[in-house]
Image (cartoon, rainbow, N blue to C red):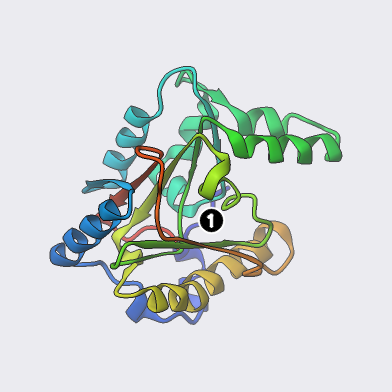
Amino acid sequence: MSQQKSDYADDTEIDESLDRLADEETVDETVANLEANGFEVVVVDSADEALAEVQSIVPAGASVMNGHSTTLEEIGFDEYLSDGDHGWESLPDEIWSIDDDEERQAARREAQTADYFLGGVNAIAETGALVAADRSGSRIGAYPFAAGNVVIVSGVNKIVPTLDDALDRLESVAYPLENERAKEAYGVDSAIAKQLIFRQELESGRTTVVLVREQLGY
């Protein structure tokens, strides 16, 4: 069962000033700066449109892996990937069918090099940088280099003015909520153990950011 932000927001103290829907001027400036830094950017109005955009980006026959992302759950991507009616090679299905722990972990590492790796981020600086963190690194390990292509889906509520604000958002919005989710889902605390600041994409067309004009994710 997926866990949504609403499951924890009332019981978790977050900095709500860093979790507000960005206005159109801010979105436009963010898009311009992300594109200047080498990212492809698509802006859509809704979760349904975001899923349709992802479906159009990933070609038939591609191997697909995703890191845990509440945003991907909210747009319906996880359900769509597990249904199998897409023509892709679903690496999560292959991984979680492996009984042996060591073999499954090796398969998870290999999946970082998927043709298309999908996930979210914890914050986006208006100046054009992405910030994300993991406890294990199983999500952000693919973003800088390993995956052939990366598709990041984010609500515009994750846009903040500066990189310092993005790092603050990671600590004061994303982490408290993710920690509650991890305790319920896995029985352990989360941790900002491995952190990525993605400032530039140097390979043309490799990384696409799908921005959604909705309040999504942590």
Q: Is residue 158 left or right of residue 104?
A: left
**Considering only vertical position in the picture, is 119 above or below 18?**
above
Q: Identify which residue, 26 or 162, lies in the foreground.
A: 162
Corner quadrant of residue 165: bottom left
The structure residue drawn at horizontal position 70% and vertical position 39%, both measured from the top left corner, is 108
Q: Residue furthest front?
A: 202
- In terms of secondary structure, where does tag 1 sit? loop
**Considering only vertical position in the picture, is 89 above or below 99?**
above
Circle 1: residue type: Gln
Q: Position of residue 82 (x, y in %)?
A: 55, 30
Q: Is residue 43 left or right of residue 12?
A: left
The structure residue drawn at horizontal position 46% and vertical position 52%, both measured from the top left corner, is 120
**Count of numbered labels shown in the rendering:** 1
Q: Position of residue 39 (x, y in %)?
A: 33, 48
Q: Which residue is mark 1?
A: 3
Give neighbour class at mark 1: few <14, some 14-19, many 20+ (Cα, 10 Å): some
**Considering only vertical position in the picture, is 150 above or below 211?**
above
- Where the C terminus falls, by quadrant? bottom left
**Considering only vertical position in the picture, is 110 above or below 39?**
above
Q: Identify which residue, 32 or 91, lies in the foreground.
A: 32
The structure residue drawn at horizontal position 44% and vertical position 38%, both measured from the top left corner, is 77
Q: Position of residue 203 (x, y in %)?
A: 41, 41
Q: Position of residue 24 (x, y in %)?
A: 14, 62
The structure residue drawn at horizontal position 69% and vertical position 35%, both measured from the top left corner, is 110
